[in-house]
Amino acid sequence: MKIIKNFSIEGKHQKPIVTDVFYNETHQPKKVVIFCHGYKGFKDWGAWNLMAEAFANAGFFFIKFNFSHNGGTLEQPIDFPDLEAFGNNNYTKELDDLASVINWIFNANEYRNEVDLQQVSLIGHSRAGGIVLLKSNEDSRIKKVITLASVCDFGKRTATISDLDQWKNEGVKYVVNGRTKQKMPHFYQFYENFIQNKERLDIKKATEQLAIPHLLIHGDNDTSVLIHEAENLQQWNQNADYKIIKNADHVFNVKHPWKQKDMSKEMEEVVDLCINFIKN
C-alpha cells in the first residue's frame, strides 16, 4: 500500500491544507473517497488511519486532510499549536478547503493513472457532515455522499441569544478541549461569517435538494450530536440510506490516541457500510 502523509495542498486562505493519500498502486483507475474531519478534529484522530487503510485495501483511492484553520500546522498536524488559526476558522473556509482538495485531485498528474474522476465520493464526520452535504449540492463532480454522526443545522450551533452580546463585545469566546485542556478561541467573525452566508449554509435546503445517493450513519448512543439530527436529515431526504449503529457513541466507540491494531466493532461496521455503499 502506498501511504503518502503530511503533504501540503495550497488553498485560498494562506494556510496549508495538510493532506494524506492511501491507495494500492495498480495503475488502474480507482474510485476516489475524500474524508473530512469534524469540529476540534484532525485527519489522524483515533482510528481514521485504520479507516483509510481499509478503504485502500478495498480498492479505493482515499484522501484525508486537515482543514486549513483547524489549529494544526504542517509541522504539527496532530494537536492544535495554532490557536489563532482555529479562532479564525469558519464554515465557508471549510467549504473552500474542501473545494481546493477536490480541485487538487482533478489536476494531480502524478495520480492520473490511479484515480477514476467520474467516481468521487465525500465522507464527513460530525460538523463536516454538514460541510459535505453543502458541497455535494454545490459541486456536480461529487457522485455519492456519506455523513457520519452529522449535525443538521449550523445555525443552532453558531450562537445562542444569551451569549451573543457578550461574544460581540469581547470579540472572542472560548471552549476547552477536553483532551489537550487548551482554551480554544472562537473569534466573533465566525458568527458574522455565518450570518453573511446563511442561505448557502442551509443544510436542510441542501439535503432536500440533494440529487445523488446519500448514506446517513448515526450511533444510537451519541450524546454529542443527538440522533434526532440524523432523523431530521432522513426526513429531509427520504431517499437517503439511513443506518443506526447500535451502542455507538459520537465517534463510534473509538478514542484518541487509538493504539489498538483494529478498529472498534462499531467503527468496523461503519467502514463496511461505507465501502459497500460506494462500491455498489
Image (cartoon, rainbow, N blue to C red):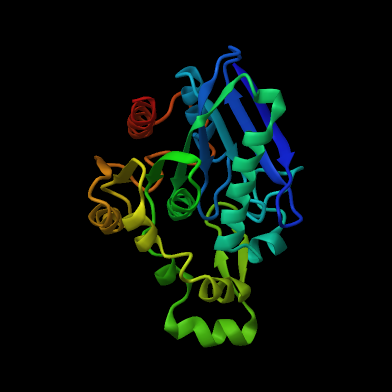
Would residue 269 appear left or right of 84 to someone viewing this image?
left
Which image quadrant is residue 272 in? top left
Task: Say how many tags the image has.
Answer: 0
Which image quadrant is residue 181 in? bottom right
Toward the viewer: 96 or 245? 96
- Residue 141: x and y in percent read 50, 41
- Residue 53: x and y in percent read 52, 24
Res 161 seen here? yes
Instruction: Give the quarter of the figure containing the N terminus.
Output: top right
- Residue 242: x and y in percent read 25, 43
Toward the viewer: 201 or 128? 201
Would residue 40 appear left or right of 8 to someone viewing this image?
left
Toward the viewer: 40 or 132? 132
Look at 57% across and 16% down and name the residue there. Answer: 24
Residue sticking out furthest to the top = 26
Look at 59% across and 84% down and name the residue there. Answer: 168
Instruction: Give the quarter of the figure containing the C terminus.
Output: top left
Check the image and report above or below for 193 versus 143. Answer: below
Check the image and report above or below for 104 versus 197. Answer: above
Check the image and report above or below for 262 versus 136. Answer: above
Res 224 seen here? no
- Residue 137: x and y in percent read 44, 52
Which image quadrant is residue 190 in? bottom right
Look at 27% across and 45% down and name the residue there. Answer: 240
